């Protein structure tokens, strides 16, 4: 393997266009890689032993449905309270703040970025008390989330349907979000049509159908395995003919490194704009349990579909969804909505101050 | 994207290279980089601390060794440690003496339970068993319908009944006994670990069907919360193993390490694609390098494996090393490469690639032009580019819509490439004769150590 890398460096040293050579390196690497993998899989060990079960121990923390959210938000209370009870800002104070942010999935780079200016303020003695430090951090993070508009884009001047496209990885909660969004928009007096663009996952259309019935929306479905672009195009045509205000377009979940599926999504977006309506919102659904991969998701989906907002789902669980702080501050994609449960009205506006407070609670 | 651990350590170790050994201070600095790499991979911070301490002891102890350079040592220690932590006991699937063998699937919403249930059923089928799937997710709209469709695709019957999930599961068990199925896989609704009511329900399902195996399905993209989730589910259900889903994504998958560490239960299966047979037993070694950010190479190889035919690839590699590689072969490789996605992204994934190359723009039209030039050659010319004289060059450039200079460049580069490959072949690169030939920042050495330990013939 070394030889390959040396080879690659030799190529780099050459100033001539080296595309061809680079390709050759790749080709060679693959050839050899395949050989190696072949050898390796031939020698796969197959040892194992049966595991015995252990008795169930302590029950899960109990929380009533009503204060579920607030309970969750104080479950990691330990980290910060100890920081606050100290009399002076020490290395431990910093460590604890850092840990709280890391535990909330804010990420290493973003955490360093938000702590850096505070380190300056402490150094210059502008902040002395640990409690002031914590408050300053909170304020600073809230401030960084204050520049975006979180309004859902709905163009009332458009004499055609607004189209909101919902995208994201598998299992993020796209279909459920559409159901809730439909109910919410319906309550605002808008007529809604759902376009079942997830033609891939088994029964995704049925799932959406249930939500359409629950929320009083129309639905346009295509054949299983059919072309999502055409389903959505048909949906827009139907909405336009029936003077429906809003088309909520579902798409199949896809992992952002799947080039073909991402290209398909680009096409979906392009085709959706071709009919009578106009795409006014592309919502990326991010599961609150998502770790650092969320940032990659946002980058790739934004590149493929010009995402206009993030919906953070499953925030009623124990995960804090800190990655959306990185997404909004680094990629300038505002978080617009938050999903808090499985019932139809569990979709609320994102509140920056509340979100930041919860990261530390 | 995140840096690989070898890239990170490259910077830190640069200054140490000549000293050949690590002081305790160096180790601390190096471990800070390892810590960042692990956190970026979503390994839980408590687990990270644990890993770092284990590594520190070994790293300081290993400083007097002169067999490997410091970078190689550290990467090897970290890699070995992660493999050890991820591996250990594997889950051996055994079958109940009184069938059916019941398997219970549990996890958060959207983690991939239903798909994993179907994939698992397919796996049991491949083991010669006759599974029955039970749809006990009566919560999510159309979840049972989804399971039915998947069941039909793999030819496995699906049972469900409306009403209460606990009762549905119980009826499913009776149904399996009635129709003589020997494996019963119960799919349950997604639930939050902190939802006491729902956790109680899944506990009751478990009590009703007495599963031989309870699997927790964890999304490979999960962040820090994986630990909380795993602990809660284990406390309620006593988990036997973990199924890691969506591993075909590009998440580093540190959650696997976190969960393995806090539960001490094996990761049994990994779900690696949209198709129902994209489901395999878990490989700790591959996961370790992936968490360290060095798994892209393996991913690439796997991707390559899918598009390249193995025999052909071996043949071509041998040809290349012998210098028998023709433009025809090159064209073929180019086309197979194109199937793997944009060449830019493929280049980006190569570890140890010099930065200039990683960032080199490879416009698709340049690739097209290269193809066009080769297409405009006769078979003889492709096999033997020396034939290409002045008038042939003009013809080729006209045929491909390029200039004579373009054709010249291609021919020249191709012959240089061939020469270099032949030299490499002569050096016996596959024999592991690595030597001290590493120039520049020396990353390749570490990489080679890491890759060699995993990929090399054992």
Image (cartoon, coloured by chain):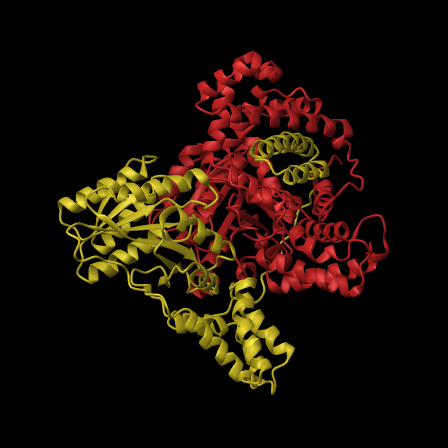
**Quick one: A116 or A285, which is closer to the camera?**
A116
Vertically, is B238 above or below B286?
Answer: below
Q: Position of residue B167 (x, y in %)?
A: 41, 52
Give the side of residue A216 with respect to residue A102, left or right: left
- Do we see residue A156 in this rendering? yes
Give the side of residue A306 with respect to residue B304, left or right: left
Q: Residue at x 49, y 25 (%)?
A: B371
Q: Name the image quarter holding the C terminus of chain B.
A: top right
Chain in yellow (letter): A
Q: Residue placed farthest to the bottom in the image?
A: A87
- Residue B303: image quadrant is top right
Q: Position of residue B29 (x, y in %)?
A: 71, 63
**Quick one: B443 or A315, which is closer to the camera?**
B443
Chain in red (letter): B
Q: Position of residue B379 (x, y in %)?
A: 54, 13
Give the side of residue A45 with respect to residue A260, left or right: right
**Quick one: B242 or B255, which is closer to the camera?**
B255
Vertically, is A331 above or below B272?
Answer: below
Vertically, is A200 above or below B293?
Answer: above
- Do we see residue A197 in this rendering? no
- Residue B157: image quadrant is top left
* Total number of numbered discs in the rendering: 0
Q: Position of residue A152 (x, y in %)?
A: 28, 60
Q: Residue at x 60, y 81 (%)?
A: A123
Q: Residue placed farthest to the front in the image?
A: B390
């Amino acid at each position: 393997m070394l030889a390959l890398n040396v080879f690659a460096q030799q190529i780099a040293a050459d100033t001539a266009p080296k595309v061809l050579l680079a390709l050759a390196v790749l080709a060679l690497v693959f050839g050899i890689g395949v050989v190696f993998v072949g050898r390796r899989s031939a020698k796969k060990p197959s040892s194992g032993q049966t595991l015995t079960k252990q008795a169930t121990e302590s029950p899960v923390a109990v929380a009533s449905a009503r204060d579920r959210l607030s309970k969750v938000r104080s479950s990691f209370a330990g980290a910060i309270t100890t920081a606050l009870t100290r009399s002076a800002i020490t290395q431990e104070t910093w460590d604890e703040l850092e840990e709280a942010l890391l535990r909330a999935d804010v990420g290493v780079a973003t955490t360093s970025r938000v702590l850096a200016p505070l380190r300056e303020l402490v150094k210059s003695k502008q902040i002395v008390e640990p409690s002031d430090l914590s408050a300053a951090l909170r304020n600073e993070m809230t401030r960084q989330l204050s520049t975006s508009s979180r309004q859902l884009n709905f163009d009332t001047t458009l004499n055609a349907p607004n189209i909101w496209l919902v995208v994201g990885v598998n299992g993020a909660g796209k279909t459920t979000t559409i159901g809730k969004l439909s109910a919410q928009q319906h309550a605002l007096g808008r007529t809604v049509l759902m376009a079942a663009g997830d033609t891939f996952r088994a029964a995704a259309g049925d799932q959406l159908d249930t939500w359409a019935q629950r929320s009083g929306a129309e639905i346009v479905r295509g054949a299983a395995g059919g072309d999502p672009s055409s389903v959505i195009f048909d949906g827009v045509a139907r909405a336009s003919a029936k003077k429906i205000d809003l088309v909520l377009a579902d798409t199949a979940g896809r992992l952002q490194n799947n080039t073909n599926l991402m290209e398909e999504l680009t096409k979906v977006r392009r085709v959706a704009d071709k009919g009578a309506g106009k795409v006014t919102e592309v919502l990326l659904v991010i599961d609150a349990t998502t770790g650092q991969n969320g940032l990659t998701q946002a980058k790739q989906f934004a590149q493929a579909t010009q995402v206009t907002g993030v919906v953070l789902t499953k925030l009623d669980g124990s995960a804090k969804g800190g990655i959306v702080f990185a997404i909004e501050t680094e990629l300038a994609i505002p978080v617009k909505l938050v999903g808090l449960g499985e019932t139809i009205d569990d979709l609320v506006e994102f509140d920056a101050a509340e979100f930041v407070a919860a990261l530390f609670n | 994207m995140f840096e690989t651990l070898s890239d990170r350590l490259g910077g830190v170790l640069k200054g140490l290279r000549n000293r050949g050994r690590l002081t305790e201070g160096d180790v601390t600095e190096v471990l800070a980089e390892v810590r960042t790499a692990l956190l970026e991979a979503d390994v839980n911070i408590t687990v990270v601390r644990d890993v770092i301490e284990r590594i520190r002891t070994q790293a300081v102890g290993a400083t007097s060794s002169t067999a490997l350079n410091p970078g190689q040592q550290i990467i090897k220690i970290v890699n070995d440690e992660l493999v050890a932590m991820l591996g250990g006991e594997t889950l051996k699937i055994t079958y109940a003496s009184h069938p059916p063998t019941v398997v219970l699937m549990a996890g958060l919403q959207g983690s991939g339970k239903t798909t994993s249930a179907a994939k698992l059923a397919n796996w049991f089928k491949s083991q010669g068993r006759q599974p029955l799937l039970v749809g006990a997710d009566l919560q999510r709209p159309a979840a049972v319908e989804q399971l039915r469709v998947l069941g039909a695709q793999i030819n496995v019957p699906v049972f469900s009944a409306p009403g209460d999930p606990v009762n549905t599961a119980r009826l499913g068990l009776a149904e399996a006994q009635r129709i003589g199925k020997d494996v019963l896989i119960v799919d349950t609704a997604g639930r939050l670990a902190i939802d006491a009511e729902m956790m109680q329900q899944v506990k009751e399902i478990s009590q009703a069907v007495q599963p031989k195996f309870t699997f927790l399905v964890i999304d490979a993209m999960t962040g820090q919360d994986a630990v909380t989730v795993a602990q809660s589910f284990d406390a309620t259900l006593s988990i036997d193993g973990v199924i890691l889903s969506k591993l075909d994504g590009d998440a580093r998958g540190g959650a696997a390490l976190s969960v393995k560490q806090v539960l001490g239960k094996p990761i049994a299966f990994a779900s690696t694609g949209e198709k129902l047979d994209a489901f395999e037993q878990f490989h700790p070694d591959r996961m370790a390098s992936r968490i360290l950010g060095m798994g892209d190479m393996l991913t690439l190889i796997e991707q390559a494996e899918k598009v390249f035919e193995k025999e052909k690839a071996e043949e071509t590699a041998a040809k290349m090393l012998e210098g028998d590689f023709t433009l025809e072969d090159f064209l073929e490789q180019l086309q197979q490469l194109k199937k793997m996605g944009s060449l830019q992204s493929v280049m980006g994934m190569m570890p140890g690639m010099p930065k200039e190359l990683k960032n080199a723009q490879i416009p698709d039209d340049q690739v097209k032009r290269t193809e066009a030039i080769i297409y405009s050659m006769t078979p003889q010319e492709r096999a033997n580019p020396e034939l290409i004289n002045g008038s042939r060059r003009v013809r080729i450039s006209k045929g491909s819509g390029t200039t004579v200079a373009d054709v010249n460049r291609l021919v020249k580069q191709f012959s240089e490439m061939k020469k270099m490959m032949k030299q490499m072949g002569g050096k016996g690169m596959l024999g592991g004769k690595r030597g001290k030939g590493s120039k520049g920042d020396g990353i390749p050495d570490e990489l080679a150590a890491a890759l060699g330990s995993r990929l090399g013939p054992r």
